[in-house]
Image (cartoon, rainbow, N blue to C red):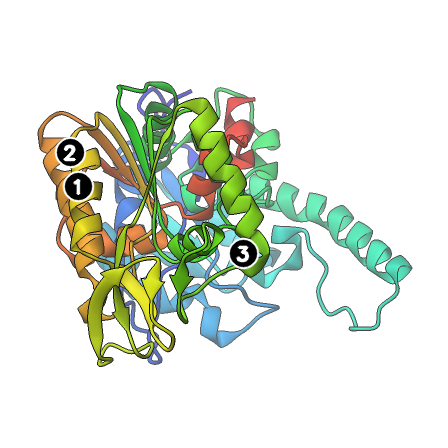
Amino acid sequence: MTIDQFNFAGKKAFVRVDFNVPLDENFNITDDTRMRAALPTLKKILADGGSAIIGSHLGRPKGVTEKFSLKHILKHLDELLGIEVQFANDCMGEEAAAKAAALQPGEALLLENLRFYAEEEGKPRGLADDATDEEKAAAKKAVKESQKEFTKKLASYADCYVNDAFGTAHRAHASTALIAKYFDKDHKMFGYLMEKEVKAVDKVLNDIHRPFTAIMGGSKVSSKIEIIENLLNKVDNLIITGGMTYTFTKAQGGKIGLSICEDDKLDLALDLMQKAKEKGVNLVLATDAKIADSFSNDANTKFCKVNEIPDGWEGLDIGPESEKAFAEVIKGSKTILWNGPTGVFEFENFTHGSRSVGEAIVEATKNGAFSLVGGGDSVACVNKFGLASGVSYVSTGGGALLEAIEGKVLPGIAAINE
């Protein structure tokens, strides 16, 4: 069932959204992108004459805490939806059930943070540091058993289930996957955002127009091994950049000064280079770097060969040679995946490389390429540089997107498709 095929008139929909938005010290929302992304789904339900029971998490609470209460976002949600959204102070209990039951067509109810309950994630809390294996096993069993009742209760509020939270699709949590079992295939569906995410990931991994180029940034090779290995079976070009550059450079005998490096992954880097060669993948690494004499925006800087970084200096971005080489590969591509910046883009003096990659992707997209940008830092990059509208798709999912690229089946997607 798709959301467009379903008529919500007279129906109550449990909608799992991702309203895990950043808040400042006064609980003001500093970026409402995730809330705005869910609006088409919520508005469709309300416009049909349905009512929406909205569930989300906020942060990583270890119990009930004021800091992570969803009541902080209620006023802004009212403004975005143009109605007064009701609020249940607890996602469980009589109040939530009564308010859900009393909802009228066109009305919405926001439940309190689902993660205030350990049952949402299915992980025990409050275990002593010196807990025995038996105690840990017993606690895990107990929370798993109570998770069933928790999930059943959430499902009881509604006639249908809509998952619009791609950002948590890689988690087999109560509200993102387990709840779907309480609805038949005609009463569970993806929301519009989730639909778009699933299609974009499928297109970049399975409907490939070549050449296919992936740009993988980030500081650690260890966190990207499975992604890189999966991509080596799919891409024509793999640009490895960011902090990972220096592990690859050192592995080849280069001098990297104080640059970030995983010394225990040097053999792995060489192994990945060998695999790329065997598979005929063009593995592109930086040849020069913008280096600094301290990890600071105000540090002294200069450019040098990436394998000739002096002692006391560290690479914080790529240099002009590498920018040109990366851009050439990107502009010649028809499918592009970007995950991870080229340097410490949070510092204004080290944004140039990431900006040049973003601009090259925009140019390739204008010339007919399909481009998918995903992962928190890459998304922050394209938003910071005002380039988001120039790429084909900007994914809201960090971990979910990365696991999809690794080739893993995401529980939140599988639960709807079952």
Percent of width and height locating residue 27: 35, 75
User: Which structural element holds mark 2?
Assistant: helix
Q: Is residue 205 visible?
A: yes
Residue at numbered disc 2: 331
Q: Residues within 10 Å of mark 1 (few under 14, many from 20)?
A: some
Cα–Cα gap, marks 3 and 1: 44 Å
Would you say 59 lies left or right of 182 here?
left
Q: On the image, which quarter does residue 296 sit in? A: bottom left
User: Which structural element holds mark 3?
Assistant: helix
User: Which structural element holds mark 1?
Assistant: helix
Judge whether 8 appears above or below 97 on screen. above
- Asked if the residue under mark 1 is in contact with the one under mark 2, i.e. CB atoms within 8 Å, the reply is yes
Percent of width and height locating residue 379: 28, 51
Q: Residues within 10 Å of mark 3 (few under 14, many from 20)?
A: many
Image quarter in which the N terminus is found: top left
Badge number at residue 114: 3
Would you say 149 lies left or right of 107 here?
right
Would you say 369 lies left or right of 139 here?
left
Residue type at mark 1?
A: Ala
Judge whether 174 appears above or below 370 on screen. below
Cα–Cα gap, marks 2 and 3: 44 Å
Percent of width and height locating residue 320: 16, 54
Cα–Cα gap, marks 2 and 1: 6 Å
Q: On the image, which quarter does residue 130 sit in? A: bottom right
Residue at numbered disc 1: 327
Badge number at residue 308: none
Q: Residue at x 73, y 70 (%)?
A: 126
Can you tell which of label 2 and label 3 is closer to the viewer?
A: 2
Tally of numbered tags: 3
